[in-house]
Amino acid sequence: MPRSRLSDLLGGMMLGLAQIFSPIRQVLPTPPEQGFMLPPNLNTCSQEDLLELGLEPELAGRILEQRPYLNLRHLASQFPEVEPWVWEGLEGRVRF
């Protein structure tokens, strides 16, 4: 093997080993931009959060009582009497 290829191979191996054995860096989440808010988590939010989404107080209370929910479809299945447009209005505005 010519000398330049051998040194390239050894250099690449050393670089790979350095990456393998280097300490794992902890990546911290960046703080939200000013004015940016994550949507409320329906499994941990308050009744005020639900009222801000436009839900009626009675429905908001019932949602809080029957937590946790897996997703919006699961939430809607727990309240079959509620019109579908209510759940469609929450799509993308809540998280679980």
Image (cartoon, grey):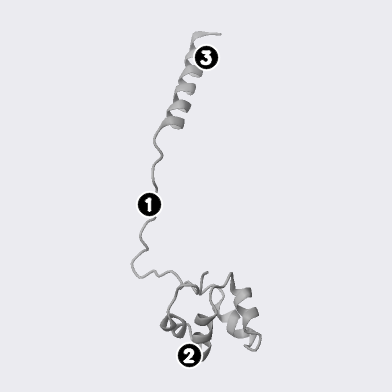
Relative horizontal placement of residue 36, taking residue 70 as reference (left or right):
left
Residue at image position (53%, 85%) is 62
How far apart marks 1 and 3 lie (CA) works out to 40 Å
What separation in Å lies between label 1 and label 2 (alpha carbons)? 37 Å
Question: Which of the two residues, 29 or 34, is positioned nearer the viewer here?
Answer: 29
Q: Who is closer to the viewer here, 12 or 5?
A: 12
Between disc 1 and disc 2, the foreground one is 2
Rendered location of residue 39, percent (x, y): 46, 72
Disc sitting over residue 28 in the figure: 1
For marks 2 and 3 on the same chain, the one whose residue lies earlier in the sequence: 3
Q: Secondary structure at mark 1?
A: loop
Which badge, 1 or 3, is on the more N-terminal residue? 3
Whole-percent x and y of residue 87?
A: 59, 81
Q: Residues within 10 Å of mark 1 (few under 14, many from 20)?
A: few
Tell me, yes or no, whether the two marked residues, 1 and 2, touch with CB atoms within 8 Å: no
Q: Which mark is residue 88?
A: none
Secondary element type, mark 2: helix
Q: Amino acid at mark 2?
A: Pro
**Residue bearing mark 3:** 5
Q: Name the residue tied to disc 2.
A: 57
Q: Tell me the residue at 47%/14% (across/down).
A: 7
